[in-house]
Amino acid sequence: MYQVHIGRLSITSPATLNHSSSSDGKSLSISGTLGGVENELDHLKYIRDQLQSMARMDEHVPFRYDGDSSLNGYVKVNSASVNVSKYLLGSFEYSIDMEYVGREGDVMFESRLTGSLLENDFNVSSSTTQQFHAPPAGHYAYIHNGEPESDIRVCKDLTSDNEFASVNLYVKTDEQLRNNNAQYVVDIEDYYKGCCQISIGTHPQKTNAGITSTVNSVMCGKDANNWQVGDSLILENGLIKLKLGVSTSKATVNTFIYDDTQYATEQEWIFSSGQITSGNQQGDDFSGWRRVQILVNRPEVAIVRCTTYLNTDKSGRLTVDFALRRGSHFVSVISNYYTAGTPVNFGLYTTPSTATDDSTISSGYIIDGTASPEDNNSWILGSTASLSTDTDLTENGIIQRAVGGATFPFFIGYILRDEDTGQPSDIDDAASIYNQYIDNVNEAQRLIKA
């Protein structure tokens, strides 16, 4: 059965498809009934929610129709309606109206690169050489007036059903990168390769052969969030993956790094409150995560906000924003606690077998002390704020602001090493990762006419 693919969403072949053109532009509308191969009710609800979210997105997405490739191109969803005839029978009638922007040869993409050096406690006031951005994997005809350096990072192909499929991302670095915008061309099948992706919960999905499997529910836009306590939340870009812990009694996250064939080097982290006494790995436990909000969900950047609390009377709010960029193998984090007088701790859930390397703490970060970590890749934690030098914390892989403050900015990442030489490349060592974090460049990708 032919399918229609709108952005990240795939649905069964429509009953009607209308393609029209006038002096005002081109339009494309489809309508039909969801069911048949997608006869699991939870799957239909997922499609319903994503369609409605996409109608509120102000961005262009690729469109593909298996039944007629001549219609393939880029569209913007103007409106979408889903009418339910009978819930028990899974009869969902839909209608989608789209602006048809053009085929691949009609459009290009531009990354607007803005931002500034993050305020920090280390007297760093000038630019570094690690401003970076990464266009989608498979892009071509790249142009930037600064002619930045280009390095390859191998990442998981999140668009492929083959769990071992990978693609090459070309990471662009230059100390003046933000001075100019970058332009490039992307074919529709490559648009989401190497991009940021948010998944919330799961849903059953049937193949054309009638085989049912449970898949992660990838979010389209930011208005389809239906997270419930205990649901999974995955923030990833094919290089690094952050997964929210599902404990109801502890605020944890797990991170993974992609190393050519799969996500590996898993680490579990925990937020805690107050001073940590010698011999312990955490202070007072925050409750498990109670709320998730999607703030940004675009291919080049994704941000989620997670909320929990400390006290039995439900007070002591903690909000944490996790931000991820395309091409990055670190996640930027900003935690905000209800009081500036009590420190927030972030660190390894369990005591490491080898003391953490804290020799670089005066430079803003600490590093995994394991001599031979899995796949030879080491985790790194750092902040723009001065960190406590208490070795009961640092040697156990825990960071805490040296000076009190309600807000605690930091990052979680990995140092990537070549499996043959055992050494990281120029953009993958600890100092470079920290520079990529502190010399912040925000990216906003937009479609432009070729």
Image: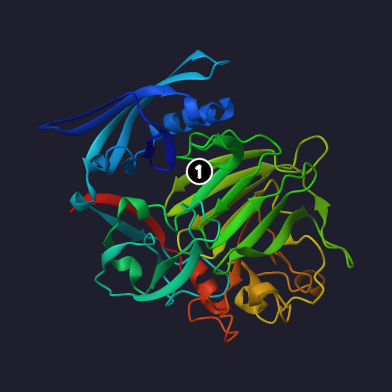
Question: The N terminus appears in which quarter of the rendering?
Answer: top left
Across and down, in percent, residue 180 comes to 28, 66
How packed mark 1 is, by other alpha carbons closer than 10 Å (few <14, some 14-19, many 20 or more), is some
Residue in view at x 53 percent, y 72 percent = 433
Q: Residue furthest right?
A: 279
Visible in this render: residue 95?
no
Q: Quadrant of residue 62?
A: top left
Asked which colour scheme the image uses, the reply is rainbow
Left or right position of 356 against 50? right
44 relative to 314 in the view: left or right: left
**Element on which disc 1 rests:** strand
- Indicate the quadrant where residue 40 lies: top right
Q: As drawn, which residue projects farthest toward the top? A: 85
Which residue is painted at 32% across and 42% down in the image?
Answer: 64
Instruction: Identify the residue shown where x is 87% and y is 63%.
Output: 280
Which residue extends farthest bottom?
A: 421
- Residue type at tag 1: Leu
Q: Nearer the viewer, residue 198 or 363?
A: 198
Residue to which mark 1 is pinned: 295
Residue 169 spot, x, y in % from top left: 42, 66
Q: Image height check: is 298 above or below 5?
A: below
Q: Measuring from the top left, give residue 440's x and y in whole percent.
A: 45, 64
